Image (tube, helix red, strand yellow):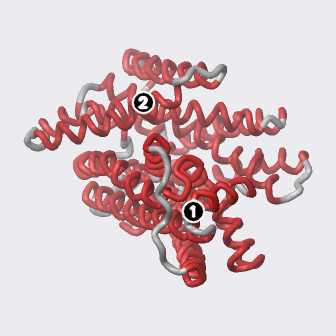
């Protein structure tokens, strides 16, 4: 079969469990528990368990909004089509290209974080080998994606399941040793809310399934319920992890502070302390895999968004993303400036992500008016979600830090310009080969 034809999205060809896997893998359960949860601990210390519960409830605002969109708009365009159908083609293009930049930049961000920060912190790897790994990763992921949509989704299903099992086993072991007790709650409110928001954004990413709307069996109904299911599983796992990681160090602020002074990967460190080196190696391997799984899910989503935004064939869309992905990783590989590349790409990715989400949140009342009956709860949901995303955008731009903030602003402006120009030049740019 011709590769172009084989890669073209096929209507209602993907079962629900693979759609759930796409969402769950994008959230990266073990990556969140082992590494990303660190940001919440730094703010809310032993109160992170309470902050995690609040954070999950806060992010539920966006989840409910995305759920309502995805039930109706079942396409390969995801965020782009949400904003387009709710508002106008231009608004849709702006939201779509902002999201495209966010995901396209996220790919080198997460893989450079893995190569340049995670691996060297655990193993003594020569710089030349790190440089090779940095370039090989995007090539391997591209080959996996060219194999079709189902292989990466099955991979995500198997590995995400193993990740959750590992977290559960570690948590049960820790609690069996420490017992059950309420963690200390003794921090300023600002720190508590900072921790809650850190957890909220840790749970982001499940919307990668929005781009499987056309291909999912059951279309929008399947995507919406899969998104809710994945978010629920991830929330329970992260809240549970925030509890047992706090329990492992004595349920106290001082215990968390001491833990963070020793390691930036508390989940991995605790696995060594409670279950030994063999389990911790397995835990680390699947933490690495969790980060890669998140990149794979983003790649799947981005290939479909590119397909929708440019009206090119799927193979061409994958190649467009691959060129962008490999180029950034090549820069990190040649310069050896992994931390800087990670820092700059993360800033650009977050600013454009929050911007696109803010647009989709702001036009939600227009969407409700078209397909449902506009009411006060819908307006409040849109307002709350818009404020949440606006805060995320604000926190990444203020206070001004050169060059990070400048990079974020340039990325934001680029997305807006791309959206406007792509709509004006639509007859020239968007044509099937």
- Disc 2 crowd rating (10 Å Cα; few below 14, some 14-19, many 20+) is many
Q: Which mark is residue 355?
A: 2
Q: Nearer the viewer, mark 2 or mark 1?
A: 1
Tally of marks: 2
Q: Is residue 76 above or below residue 50?
A: above
Q: Is residue 54 above or below residue 394?
A: below
| Residue 185, percent from left and from top | 46, 57
Q: CA distance from mark 2 to mark 1?
A: 37 Å
Asked where in the image residue 94 lies, by quadrant, the reply is top left
Q: Is residue 159 above or below residue 141?
A: below
Please tell me which residue is depicted at 55% across the width and 79% down the height of the picture. Answer: 175
The mark nearer the N terminus, 2 or 1, is: 1
Residue 7 in the figure: left or right of residue 407: left
Outermost front residue: 186
| Residue 46, percent from left and from top | 54, 59
| Residue 347, percent from left and from top | 58, 32
Residue 334 in the figure: left or right of residue 92: right
Please tell me which residue is depicted at 38% across the width and 15% down the height of the picture. Answer: 424
Asked where in the image residue 374 lies, by quadrant, the reply is top left
Residue 228 in the figure: left or right of residue 325: left
User: Does dot 1 land on a helix, a strand or a loop?
Assistant: loop
- Disc 1 crowd rating (10 Å Cα; few below 14, some 14-19, many 20+) is some
> Mark 1 and mark 2 in contact (Cβ < 8 Å)?
no
- Residue 425: tell me if it is visible: yes
- Residue 301: tell me if it is visible: no
Q: Which mark is residue 252?
A: 1
Please tell me which residue is depicted at 64% across the width and 64% down the height of the picture. Answer: 267
> Toward the viewer: 8 or 124?
124
User: Does dot 2 land on a helix, a strand or a loop?
Assistant: helix
| Residue 425, percent from left and from top | 41, 16
């Amino acid at each position: 079969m011709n590769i172009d034809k084989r890669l073209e999205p096929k209507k209602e060809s993907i079962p629900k469990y693979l759609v759930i896997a796409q969402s769950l893998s994008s959230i990266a359960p073990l990556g969140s528990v082992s590494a990303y949860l660190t940001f919440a601990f730094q703010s809310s210390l032993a109160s992170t368990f309470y902050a995690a519960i609040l954070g999950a409830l806060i992010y539920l605002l966006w989840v409910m909004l995305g759920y309502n969109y995805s039930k109706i708009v079942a396409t390969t365009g995801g965020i782009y089509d949400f904003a387009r159908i709710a508002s106008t083609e231009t608004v849709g293009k702006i939201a779509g290209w902002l999201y495209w930049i966010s995901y396209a930049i996220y790919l080198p961000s997460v893989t450079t974080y893995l190569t340049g920060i995670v691996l060297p912190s655990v193993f003594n790897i020569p710089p030349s080998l790190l440089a090779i790994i940095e370039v090989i990763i995007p090539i391997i992921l591209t080959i996996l994606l060219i194999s079709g949509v189902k292989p990466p989704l099955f991979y995500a299903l198997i590995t995400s399941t193993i990740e959750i099992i590992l977290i559960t086993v570690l948590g049960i072991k820790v609690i069996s040793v420490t017992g059950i007790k309420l963690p200390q709650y003794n921090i300023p409110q600002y720190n508590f809310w900072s921790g809650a928001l850190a957890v909220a954004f840790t749970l982001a990413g499940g919307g990668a399934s929005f781009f499987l709307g056309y291909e999912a069996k059951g279309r929008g109904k399947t995507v919406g319920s899969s998104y809710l299911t994945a978010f629920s599983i991830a929330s329970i796992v992260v809240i549970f992890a925030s509890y047992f990681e706090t329990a492992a160090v004595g349920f106290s602020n001082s215990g968390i502070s001491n833990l963070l002074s020793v390691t930036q990967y508390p989940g991995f460190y605790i696995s060594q302390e409670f279950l030994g080196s063999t389990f911790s190696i397995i835990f680390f391997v699947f933490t690495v895999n969790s980060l890669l799984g998140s990149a794979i899910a983003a790649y799947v989503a981005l290939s479909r968004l590119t397909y929708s935004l440019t009206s090119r064939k799927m193979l061409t869309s994958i190649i467009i993303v691959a060129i962008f992905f490999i180029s950034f990783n090549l820069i990190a590989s040649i310069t050896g400036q992994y931390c800087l590349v990670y820092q700059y790409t993360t800033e650009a990715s977050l600013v454009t992500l929050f911007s696109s989400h803010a647009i989709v949140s702001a036009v939600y009342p227009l969407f409700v008016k078209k397909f449902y009956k506009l009411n006060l709860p819908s307006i409040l949901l849109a307002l709350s979600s818009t404020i949440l995303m606006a805060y995320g955008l604000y926190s990444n731009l203020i206070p001004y830090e050169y060059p990070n903030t400048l990079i974020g602003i340039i990325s934001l402006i680029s997305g807006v310009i791309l959206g406007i120009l792509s709509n004006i030049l639509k007859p020239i740019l968007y044509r099937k080969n």
